[in-house]
Image (cartoon, rainbow, N blue to C red):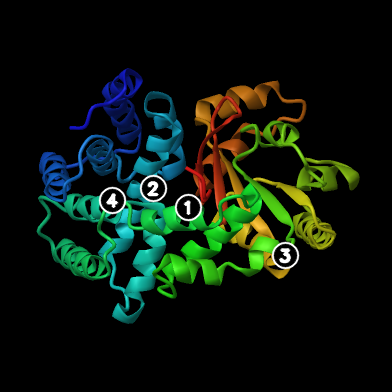
């Protein structure tokens, strides 16, 4: 494989033990031939080093919930590699299901924002190794058919978006970081949908966001006690801060969940007004799943806001330790239920994504134009 820094080698050596630990906890057994198959498939498409390791780990832990897997691997592997493994594990099952051929290019384009499609198809095929039932046979056929479409669209390379990104970075040299990130987000969304392919088209598509002001939203994502509010308190340049816990407290008790619908409605109204006024707004709530996040996104789209997910990934044991020390702890069974329901967003589901680790720092980013 490719040469690696000493800390990466140490992390890689520790990762299998961490994966085996979480996989065993979820009874996520994998056939030995599956590991051999994913390694062979990744080798066949010319990937090595971290890509090969990510594919193998994703196969071994393919049934482990993404949030738990990413948080567990962040220590031994680092956040970037950990969330790549988790996203491969989370996305591979989508390739097993039938999909309308006329929509495949756009669907694969969206997946390419979140994962290396070459490695993803290798993982999706390998987890089926050793299984001969009709469902598995059909799933393997779907994977191979998807791979043909991805190859025809030029999406199986290691970084199909990098030429577009490098060209747009050069074209937008000197533009402020926030405007540049917005242009990149809009360009890659148009690319994923098949609407543009060249740098010239990307430049033309993003013209309006270079000079026109737009508000910004930072949406915190993670269970109670993960450190969202502490992280947000350290962000510079925040013009408005909206916390659902604060709205509940104003009604009498932050622990009172009986008026959640009214609290959410009030929060969304305040968010709309804050974004309309311009500047940067923080939305502080758990936002555990895509449905909860979509309600906030609808307001952001209406106000043409740059949306950033700040995803906090902390192991469940640490969540419970922190919860015990909080001024306002949540019941342990509630926290455990939040951890089970937590489905982190994928890259591309917001304009930008910040991945915040247990130390409260941004340990990885997605969606920024700069490297």
The mark that comes first in sequence, 3 or 1, is 3
Q: CA distance from mark 3 to mark 1?
A: 25 Å
Eyeballing the image, is 4 above or below 185?
above
Say whether residue 287 is visible. no
Which residue in the structure is indicated by mark 1?
347
Is residue 94 placed above or below 83 in the rendered structure? below
137 to the left or right of 256: left
* Front position among marks 3 and 1: 3
Verify CB contact (< 8 Å) between mark 2 and mark 3.
no
Of the two numbered discs 2 and 4 on the same chain, state the one appearing first in sequence.
2
Give the residue pinned by disc 3.
212
Of callouts 2 and 3, which one flags the residue occurring earlier in the amino acid sequence?
2
| Residue 171 left/right relative to 19 | right
Given this view, does label 1 or label 2 mark the residue nearer the observer?
Answer: 1
- Label 2–label 4 contact, CB within 8 A: no
Q: Nearer the viewer, mark 1 or mark 4?
A: 4
Cα gap from disc 1 to disc 2, whole angstroms: 9 Å
Residue 158 circle label? 4
On residue 87, the disc is: 2
Q: What residue is drawn where x is 38% and y is 53%? A: 162
């Amino acid at each position: 494989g490719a040469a690696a820094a000493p800390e990466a080698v140490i992390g890689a050596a520790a990762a299998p033990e961490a994966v085996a630990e979480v996989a065993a906890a979820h009874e996520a057994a994998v056939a030995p031939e599956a590991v051999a198959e994913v390694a062979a498939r990744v080798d066949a498409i010319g990937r090595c080093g971290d890509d090969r390791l990510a594919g193998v780990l994703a196969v071994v832990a393919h049934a482990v919930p993404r949030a738990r897997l990413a948080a567990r691997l962040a220590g031994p592997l680092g956040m970037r590699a950990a969330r790549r493994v988790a996203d491969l594990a989370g996305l591979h099952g989508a390739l097993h299901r039938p999909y309308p051929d006329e929509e495949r290019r756009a669907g694969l384009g969206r997946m390419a924002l979140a994962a290396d499609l070459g490695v993803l198809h290798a993982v999706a095929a390998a987890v089926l190794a050793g299984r001969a039932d009709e469902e598995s046979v059909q799933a393997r056929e779907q994977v191979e058919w998807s791979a043909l479409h991805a190859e025809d669209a030029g999406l199986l390379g290691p970084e199909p978006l990098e030429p577009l990104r490098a060209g747009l970075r050069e074209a937008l040299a000197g533009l402020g970081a926030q405007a540049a990130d917005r242009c990149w987000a809009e360009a890659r969304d148009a690319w994923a949908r098949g609407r543009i392919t060249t740098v010239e088209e990307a430049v033309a598509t993003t013209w309006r966001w270079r000079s026109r002001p737009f508000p910004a939203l930072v949406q915190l994502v993670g269970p109670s006690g993960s450190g969202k509010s502490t992280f947000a308190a350290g962000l510079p340049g925040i013009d408005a801060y909206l916390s659902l816990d604060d709205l509940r407290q104003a009604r009498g008790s932050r622990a009172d969940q009986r008026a959640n619908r009214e609290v959410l409605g009030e929060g969304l109204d305040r968010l709309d007004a804050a974004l309309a006024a311009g500047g940067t707004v923080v939305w502080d709530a758990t936002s555990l799943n895509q449905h909860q996040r979509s309600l906030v996104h609808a307001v952001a789209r209406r106000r043409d806001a740059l949306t950033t997910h700040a995803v906090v990934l902390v192991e469940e044991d640490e969540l419970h330790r922190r919860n015990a020390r909080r001024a306002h702890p949540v019941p342990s069974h509630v926290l455990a239920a939040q951890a089970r329901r937590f489905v982190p967003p994928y890259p591309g589901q917001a304009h930008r994504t910040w991945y915040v680790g247990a130390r409260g720092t941004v340990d990885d980013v997605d969606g920024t134009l700069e490297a």
